[in-house]
Amino acid sequence: MNFSIEQYQKLASLRKLVINHPQFDKAYQAIVDSYQMKTYVDTPQNIICVGQSGTGKSTLKEKMKLTYPRVRGSEKLVIPILVVDTPSVPTVKNIAEEMLIQLGDPQFNKGSAIEKTNRILNYLEMCEVKMVIFDELQHFIDQGKRRTPYEVSDWLKTVIDKAKVSTVLMGLDRSEEILKVNEQLRRRFSRRIDIRPFDINEKESRESLIGVIRILDEKIGLPESIDLRDKSLIKSLYFATNGIIDYLVKLFIGAYEQTAKMNYNGLKKECFQVAFTECIWVEGVGKLNPFNENFVHHKLDRIGMPFHRMSVSSEERLTL
């Protein structure tokens, strides 16, 4: 069936939706506090923020950018928070260039590493930068050359020490490997924020999960609401998303599309069942589908399943 303009608008709003739950709010406030310590008492604070993909790190970063936006004045550009996305194949050279691009340097690719670093420091002061967020830090571990983590950890330490701004390192759990190669850098990032998936076996986390489900259902706004007392449905939603908020949003969007096709007044279990296969795991059918009556209630995190996490083997870890 063809969707109406209103339905397409609702789908678009769901994709942009920021859901503030207790864990997200705590992480956001910690980063705000770090920003304000630099802004108001000139005391930089450094944080490493780690978590699985889809748990809300990117949303956290975007919310900080919106809270403290760039301001272009008549004489200069003020950048309260500088966000730097780590290149997929990182080196000191290209991460320095990425910083210069975000700082508005038209000659970002000119000069030696030392010259680029000096320009970065000048721009940070000129643009009144209070915080730098380095995102996707795991790229240094995943695809960098063997010497890259050593080189970049020394470079980061130098920039952080000389810039004297609050700094946030953000990435997947294995991002912490880069701190292991440099004790001095590790000491500078002793404060850690974990953004974890919801855990149905922990009371507070389970209540947060149910709260997110309630918000998504309300935003969709169908005549019949989800029965949040239905423990079976809550468990199915948990196993279908592994408690990861990004997958919850995808699943609800897919279920809403199925509801429109089936002309239902609410999000039914069969809508979620189809949505899981179409939006999360194409092989998730029959007993491998959390909304199927034959589903065996266990996490879908084995090899070949959607929530299997690659670990860094001892051979792949950095030699300290």
Image (cartoon, rainbow, N blue to C red):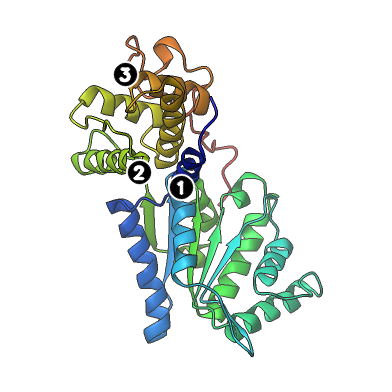
Q: Which amino acid, by three-letter code, is at mark 1?
A: Ser
Tell whether 12 sits left or right of 118: left
Q: Earlier in the sequence, mark 2 or mark 3?
A: 2
Q: What residue is pinned by disc 3?
A: 297
- Quickly name the residue at label 1: 13
Position above or below: 75 against 197: below
For the point 47% across and 50% down, the residue is 16
- Residue at the image point whose x is 46% and y is 23% from the top: 261
Determine contact: label 1, label 2, CB under 8 Å: yes
Q: Secondary structure at mark 3?
A: loop
Label 1 crowd bin: few (<14), some (14–19), many (20+), radius 10 Å? few
Amino acid type, callout 3: His
Question: Residue at the spot x=68%, y=76% of the render?
Answer: 117
Q: Earlier in the sequence, mark 1 or mark 3?
A: 1
Return the residue found at the far right.
110
Q: In the rendered image, which quarter is residue 313 located in?
A: top right
Observer-nearest of 97 and 278? 278
Q: Nearer the viewer, mark 1 or mark 3?
A: 1
Mark number, residue 219: 2
- Comes first in the chain, label 1 or label 2: 1
Residue 171 locus on image (x, y percent): 51, 52
- Measuring 39% from the left and 27% from the top, which residue is drawn there? 240
Choose between 248 and 150: the one closer to the eye.
248
Residue 29 visible in the displayed image: yes
Circle 2 sits in a helix, a strand or a loop, which is it?
helix
